[in-house]
Image (cartoon, helix red, strand yellow):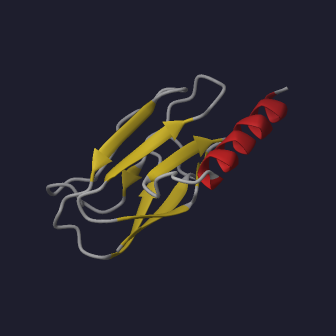
Amino acid sequence: MRKAVLFVALLVALILTALPGHAATDVNAVGETFVPAVFTAHAGDQVSLHNLEALAIAHTLTSDANLCAGVPCSTGPVASGNTGSFTLPATTAPGEYLFHCAFHIQMRAVLIVN
């Protein structure tokens, strides 16, 4: 049953990321995976995490580097069915930045700042 629920949630996440007008700064959490695993944004953009888990599992989207005023950028804990966000500082340098979930070490993503 859990595999079926995760499959449906992943399918919904894939469809959402393929729809026209879907912001590149939106990331979904599904099945302990970030979708997309590589996403893009610009300095000053808002980045949102949509927790599409069917089960009561919280996630975060947290930078490995101290990007936000000397601390990691993070959505904080986002409960199932909810959305959390943060804004990249306007001074964020172009490059690649690693992100993770504070609760699930295997959840990794890469932000490309243009």
Quadrant of residue 5 within the rendered picture: top right
Residue 68 spot, x, y in % from top left: 20, 55
Q: Is residue 17 left or right of residue 89?
A: right
- Observer-nearest of 45 and 1: 45
Q: Which residue is at 68% across, 49% downward?
A: 14
The spot of residue 56 in percent (x, y) is 59, 22
Q: At which x and y percent is residue 28?
A: 55, 45
The residue drawn where x is 57% and y is 60% is 37
Q: Residue furthest top?
A: 56
> Which quarter of the image is occupied by the N terminus?
top right
Q: Is residue 33 left or right of residue 84?
A: right
Q: Is residue 41 above or below residue 18?
A: below
Q: Is residue 27 above or below residue 9?
A: below
User: Residue at the location (47% across, 49% down)?
Assistant: 26
The residue lying toward the viewer, choosing from 2 and 15, is 15
Residue 5 lies left or right of residue 26; in this view the side is right
Determine which quarter of the picture holds residue 11: top right
Q: Quadrant of the C terminus?
A: bottom left
What's the residue at 48%, 26% (across, down)? 79
Give the quarter of the image for residue 98: bottom left
User: Residue 73, how many percent across, how many down?
Assistant: 29, 51
12 over 70 or under it: above or below: above
Report the number of numbered marks: 0
